[in-house]
């Protein structure tokens, strides 16, 4: 049984969408769920090994090597939904803001962003540990990156200013061996469809 079926509750909203972009797909756990539910998915990651595993997990998904610190290689309004699970918390503040701005650009008006990031209370996964480079942003030699951000509620207010927040929850999730405290947000890009 999947102990972290987080996308299940968003299925009704996702069903309204034609094209989904999944950022930081890793080995394709969520990609496989999306593909299995019939979505047209583009899945991106910085790791070529992860993308190879994703190809096995979700053969029908399109895969793309992409660094989230760079602009997204898609036209404006290309996707009805963007999924960014546990991949937007590795960057300094300016880079994080730029990545969110790129997501917003690539979403259709009224498009949906489903996002999960580390909470400042994620103590079992390093919150508050290591050299603090910026408030909430630490140097840590982790599995995925050498830096890690742990978000407060105020950080999220700042990062998603101008978006319509549909849902925000701070949850303990069971994706890894140790429980993880993460924020889960659903946000809508403002603006009516033309
Ligand atoms: C904690 S995993 C999350 C994977 C998956 N989305 C999930 O929720 O299980 C973080 C992912 O972000 C990717 N990642 C780390 N830095 C990245 C970057 N600069 N650009 C794109 N992906 C990055 C990693 O390769 C890894 O696949």
Image (cartoon, rainbow, N blue to C red):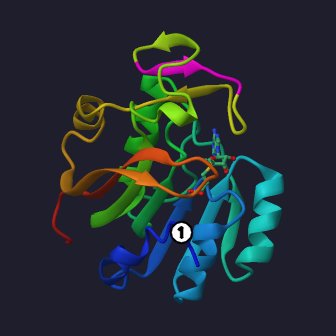
* Vertical relation: 154 (above or below) 58: above
- The CB of the residue at mark 1 lies under 8 Å from ligand 1: no
* Vertical relation: 192 (above or below) 67: below
- SS class, disc 1: loop
Which residue is identified by label 1? Answer: 3
**Residue under the image location 31 percent in, 83 percent down:** 12
- The part of the image, by quadrant, that contains residue 79 is bottom left
**Residue under the image location 82 percent in, 64 percent down:** 52
**Residue under the image location 46 percent in, 40 percent down:** 99
x and y percent of residue 146 in the render?
Answer: 68, 25
- The part of the image, by quadrant, that contains residue 138 is top right
Is residue 61 rendered to the left or right of residue 155?
Answer: right
Q: How many marks?
A: 1
Residues packed near mark 1 inside 10 Å, few (<14), some (14 to 19) or many (20 plus): few
Q: In which quadrant of the rendered image does the C terminus lie?
A: bottom left
Q: In which quadrant of the rendered image does the N terminus lie?
A: bottom right
Find out whether residue 58 is within the magenta segment: no
- Nearer-the-camera pick, 18 or 150: 150
- Residues drawn in magenta: 136-141
Is residue 127 rendered to the left or right of residue 141?
Answer: left
x and y percent of residue 58 in the render?
Answer: 70, 78
- Nearer-the-camera pick, 65 or 115: 115
**Residue under the image location 40 percent in, 37 percent down:** 119
* Vertical relation: 28 (above or below) 159: below
x and y percent of residue 104 in the render?
Answer: 35, 51
Is residue 18 rendered to the left or right of residue 59?
Answer: left
């Amino acid at each position: 049984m999947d102990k972290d079926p987080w996308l299940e509750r968003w299925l009704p909203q996702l069903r309204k969408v034609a094209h989904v972009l999944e950022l930081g797909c890793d080995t394709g756990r969520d990609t496989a769920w999306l593909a299995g539910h019939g979505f047209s998915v583009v899945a991106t990651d910085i790791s070529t090994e992860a993308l190879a595993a994703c190809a096995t997990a979700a053969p029908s998904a399109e895969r793309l090597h992409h660094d989230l610190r760079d602009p997204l290689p898609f036209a404006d309004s290309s996707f009805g939904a963007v999924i960014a699970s546990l991949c937007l918390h590795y960057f300094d503040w300016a880079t994080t803001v730029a990545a969110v701005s790129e997501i917003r650009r690539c979403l259709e008006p009224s498009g949906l962003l489903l996002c999960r990031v580390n909470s400042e209370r994620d103590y079992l996964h390093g919150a508050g540990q290591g050299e603090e480079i910026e408030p909430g942003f630490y140097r840590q030699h982790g599995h995925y990156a050498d830096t890690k951000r742990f978000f407060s509620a105020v950080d999220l207010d700042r990062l998603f200013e101008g978006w319509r927040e549909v849902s925000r929850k701070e949850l303990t999730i069971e994706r890894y061996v140790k429980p993880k405290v993460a924020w889960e947000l659903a946000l809508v890009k403002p603006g009516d469809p033309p």
